[in-house]
Image: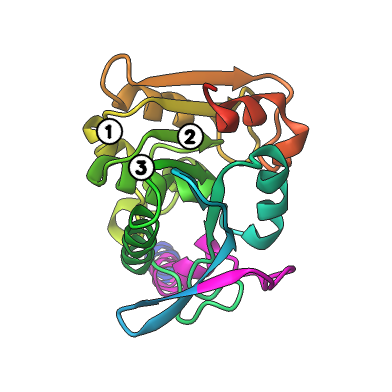
Amino acid sequence: MARWLGWIGGLALAYGGLCLLMAMTQRSFIYFPRPAGDPSGRLALEVEGTRVLVAHRPHPGPRALIYFGGNAEDVSLTRAELAALLPDTALYLLHYRGYGGSEGRPSETALRADARALYAHVAERHSAITLVGRSLGTGPAVHLAATRPVQRLVLLVPFDSLAAVARGAMPWLPVDLLLRDRWDAADEAPKVRVPTTIVAAAFDAVVPTRHAEALHRAFPPGVAELVLVPDLDHNTPILDSPAFRAALAGPR
């Protein structure tokens, strides 16, 4: 009996240690900063004493697109894809803190502040703003669409909440107790009133399709359209996907 109690105690101690390790290092599993492959054409924003960079393609006129990328995406390279697709639109792609030369470390609180600062910068210059969020970028894109006036929202391979994705991937961890950056897009989606297009992979090995479907259900009736694409991969380049291109181009 004492031996069994010893084993149980050891396992409990090991499990507690694992939970503590995951709690302390969790952001290293969420954010994967990348340098900017193309450092040209950047503008800098000062947000709460932190210098945050934006990959920019200027264009006069009312149309602008604000882009929030995935957790390991170099948005300076994505800019070239968007520039080829949208020649008549000004482009603003946020380098998250720690990414592409931006100062600081990424967190949900910091990235929300950066997204609001970028929106304010763009709204002073353009009146027709489209928001795009890809994967992790779902969170800041939905946050802005729920709290700021925009024209359209486009979500590429999105999720309902980071907590829901983590619960599915690590059911053996008390995710709800440990996770600090929750990115609960489904919680803010009911406040969105602008036309929204959700493009999801029918068989997504990174973020299972049920998360995009749950996010779609969270929007008010008639606001969001869900497009499930059979041959789409979570990391498919924008120009390689007709569904991505159609969603981003929008009605003309």
Please give left or right for residue 3 compared with residue 33 in the image: left
Residue 165, percent from left and from top:
46, 43
Residue 230, percent from left and from top:
69, 19
Q: Which mark is residue 142?
A: 3
23 within the magenta span: yes
Where, by quadrant of the figure, is residue 47 drawn?
Answer: bottom left
Whole-number angstrom distance, CA of label 3 to CA of label 2? 9 Å
Where, by quadrant of the figure, is residue 202 drawn?
Answer: top right
Residue 149, percent from left and from top:
27, 41
- Position of 123 relative to 199 (above/below): below
Type of amino acid under label 3: Val
Q: Where are the magenta residues, as a range?
A: 14-43
Nearest the viewer among 176 and 144 is: 144
Pick the quarter of the image with the N terminus: bottom left
Whole-number angstrom distance, CA of label 2 to CA of label 1? 12 Å
How many residues crowd around disc 3 within 10 Å: few (fewer than 14), some, or many (20 or more)?
many
Type of amino acid under label 1: Val
Residue 47 appears in the picture as rendered = yes
Question: CB of mark 1 within 8 Å of CB of mark 3?
Answer: yes
